[in-house]
Image (cartoon, rainbow, N blue to C red):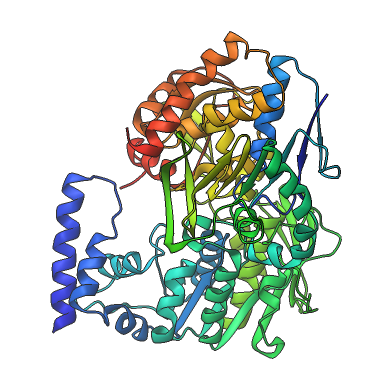
Amino acid sequence: MIKLATFLPTYFNNNGDQGNIEVLAKQLEWRGVQYSVTSNELKDSDFLLVGDGSRAVMREFKSELAAITDVVAERLSSGKATLLVGSAHEFFCSRLPGLPELKYAPRVSENRQVSSGGLRVFGYRNNEIDNDLFIEQAFISTSLFGPILAKNENLLNIVLTSMGVTTELPAVHQSRLAPVLQGVRSKALGS
Amino acid sequence: MISILAVAVGRIVRFIIRIFRRGGGSAFPGTVASSIAPNLLSDAIRSARKGLVVVSGSSGKSSTTQVLVALLRAHGYKVFTNPSTANIKQGLYAAILQFGDYRGHIDADFVVMEWDEGHGAALVESLQPRLAVLTNVYSDQLDRFVDPELVVEKLKKIYDHSDHAVINVDDKNLTQFVNPEKITGFGLSPSIQPRPSYAINFGPEPKVEPSVEVSKLGERSLQVRVPERLLSFETKADAPHQALNLAASIAAVSKLIEPDWDLVEKTVSNLPPVFARDEIASVRGKEVRFLLCLNPTSFTHSLSEISDRTSPLMIMAGSDISDPSWLWTVDFSKLRHVDVVGGKNAYDLALRLMYQDVQVDRIILEADKAADAFLELSGPSPTVLFTADAMRRTRRYLGFAK
């Protein structure tokens, strides 16, 4: 049974980031792989999502975020499947050695394609953090919001492989999704 | 003199644009006019005899403005207002070009304007409204406003520069910054559920009693309590967030004039729906239901208004959505299939639907082609859900716009 964990999903869902959990859950369901979703047992999960929170949420849950720093650090060192988004990306980059030192730039609100370690990923950026993407094995930290795993098959496959999923996506779903993904990419990147 | 020139040039630009873009609104003539005569808007507003009323907030601006204008007109007042699609600075100037005289002056008792939060905050210092109606703060349009707290700052600025304010006292994003002596409150009775999901706020919840309270919601009816009596309305806008818009309008009109409450009841009950806000219109011989979805809240409400057997169904996500990520905060799982997914963001919407196991038959980006494909389908309950941009394009194509 694969365990998908998400940190305080009601609050850390500023830009639909919790959609990434839905994507993984549905991908597993389509493949016939058993899974569960938890927001309590973060430590031993196969995947951990910490989404973006508003300013009010970040103030309110600062100590709760700090309390999972060790969990996140352990996942970083082992390259375990993890996705930190937006303000969570900013929070942990400023605390965890091994994550990139934060750089800031004038705010950007646009779809953009970025790369890390030879991997190209696209998504929507809407902040001043100029470190768009960090990937170490299956540990992902990014300033790109929203359902990034839905839009980027390469990123999704890294996460699924890291969780030990070997079953192929049934052809019926592949053929449904492929043209839609191409359309999403073309619209976002204008190509 | 400069105003006369600005109005003349702006109207010529507007005329030329409409030759090439029939039925389409444009704020560009307003941009031209404002660059020639920056005071055109403030001069026009000053020419109104009873001053400026503004309506702002994340959601509910158009409906609140529409009802308030109707109530004032029903009481015999002349009201100048801006079309709901022209609530940014350039659009306000464009409205003056369209409805003002050759100097840009307007013959009105009241000016009632719907203001975009950002543009309103930039305009308010120079225009000094007599009354500001502030509806709510949602986690919405984050690509523009970044964080709800920045929306609160903008609404507070509008509040600070207005003589008096009508405030949604259910939303503590608003009540946290107001002086109770400077406001007239409106809200929902504690028994009414579900409550709208305002922007997350962990701060204090100041208790401000509403002067106007929605006391009961029924099927196509609602009741609103004002200090003088209980008002009853027949209306399709019977969801909590829609009832709040009505309460806001009633609170505002009670602050501006001495209302005839019987006339208020009659006027509201007879109001036609704003286009596409749950309107049924005859199109090519079919009775088509149109539901406008501006944000996650109204999308969720519109979905609650249809069934999983609604057919044919078209959902459109237009170019007004800069980042379609928020579509993933809307639960579409009650749907079985959507016949046509349309609009500039159709692929993003289709992706969202597919991950909720909703069957998508066709994806068509262009509004005109999507409308044609949809109208060819047969079924008992043709229904369209669309965002504002898709609504404007579809409306223009189907001939609803002049």
Query: Is B231 placed above or below A98 here?
Result: below
Q: How many labels does the image show?
A: 0
- The location of residue B300, given as percent across then percent down, is 66, 43
Residue sitting at x 15%, y 78%: B4
- Place residue B127 in its image quadrant: bottom left
- The location of residue B117, given as percent across then percent down, is 49, 68
Q: Is residue B253 left or right of residue B391?
A: right
The answer to whether residue B40 shows anywhere in this view is yes
- The location of residue B270, given as percent across then percent down, is 58, 55
The answer to whether residue B275 shows anywhere in this view is no
Quadrant of the frame with the N terminus of chain B: bottom left
Q: Nearer the viewer, residue A149 or B321?
A: A149
Q: Is residue B256 left or right of residue B45?
A: right
Q: Which of B19 and A155 is in front in this view?
A: A155
Query: Is B302 placed above or below B77 here?
Result: above
- The location of residue B365, given as percent across then percent down, is 39, 30
Query: Is B306 placed above or below B294 here?
Result: above
Residue sitting at x 49%, y 44%: B387
Q: Nearer the viewer, residue A165 or A177?
A: A165
Question: Given the current orientation, which residue lies at the most extreme top position?
Answer: A171
- Place residue A138 in its image quadrant: top right
Q: Which of A156 and B365 is in front in this view?
A: A156
Q: Is residue B359 left or right of residue A186?
A: right
Query: Is A38 placed above or below B164 here?
Result: above
Q: In this view, does B339 lie to the left or right of B391?
A: right
